[in-house]
Image: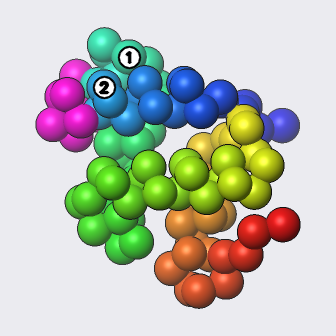
C-alpha cells in the first residue's frame, strides 16, 4: 500500500526542496524522504520543466479532484497523465 501524505506535508516538502535548491541530499536530511523524492523524481519531469509552480498546480488539481492526501506514486501518475493530456478530474 502506498503511503499518502497530506497537502500540508507536500507543501512543506516542496518548500524544503526549493530552499535547498533542489539538492536531494540536503533537502532529505533537513525535511525527510518526501522532499528528497521531489528533488530526485519530480523537478526534472518533462511536465514540470524545473518550474516548481507547476508542482503547486498539480497539488491543486489533486485537491480539486477531492484528493486531500496522495502518495508519491499518485503524483507520478498525475504527472504522466498531465503530460499525455489524459488528466481528468472526477
* Image x and y of residue 16, in percent: 30, 25
In the rendered structure, which disc, 1 or 2, sits on the residue that comes first in sequence?
2
64 left or right, relative to 54:
right
Provide residue 18's location: percent of width, then percent of height: 24, 35
Quadrant for the C terminus in the image: bottom right
| Whether residue 23 can be seen here | no
Q: Are marks 1 and 2 in contact (CB under 8 Å)?
A: yes
Q: In the rendered structure, which segment of residues is drawn in magenta?
A: 18-26
Q: Residue at x 44, y 39 (%)?
A: 37
Viewer-proximal residue among 73 and 66: 66
Q: Which mark is residue 31?
A: 1
Q: 64 or 7, which lies in front?
A: 64
Taking the view exactly as shown, the residue that stands out farthest to the left is 21
Q: Secondary structure at mark 1?
A: helix
Q: Is residue 78 above or below residue 17?
A: below
Compare residues 84 and 68 and report the one nearer the observer: 68
Image coordinates of residue 25 in percent, x first then y, are 26, 27
Q: Is residue 75 left or right of residue 38?
A: right
Residue 12 seen: yes
Relative image position of residue 11 (x, y in whole percent): 46, 31
Considering every residue shown, the one lying at the far top of the view is 30
Q: How many marks?
A: 2
Amino acid at each position: 500500500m502506498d503511503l499518502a501524505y497530506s497537502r500540508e506535508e507536500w507543501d512543506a516538502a516542496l518548500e524544503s526542496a526549493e530552499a535547498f535548491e533542489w539538492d536531494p541530499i540536503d533537502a532529505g536530511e533537513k525535511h525527510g524522504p518526501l522532499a528528497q523524492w521531489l528533488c530526485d523524481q519530480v523537478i526534472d519531469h518533462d511536465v514540470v520543466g524545473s518550474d516548481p509552480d507547476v508542482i503547486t498546480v498539480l497539488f491543486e488539481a489533486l485537491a480539486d479532484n477531492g484528493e486531500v492526501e496522495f502518495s508519491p506514486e499518485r503524483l507520478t501518475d498525475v504527472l504522466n497523465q498531465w503530460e499525455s493530456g489524459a488528466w481528468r478530474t472526477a
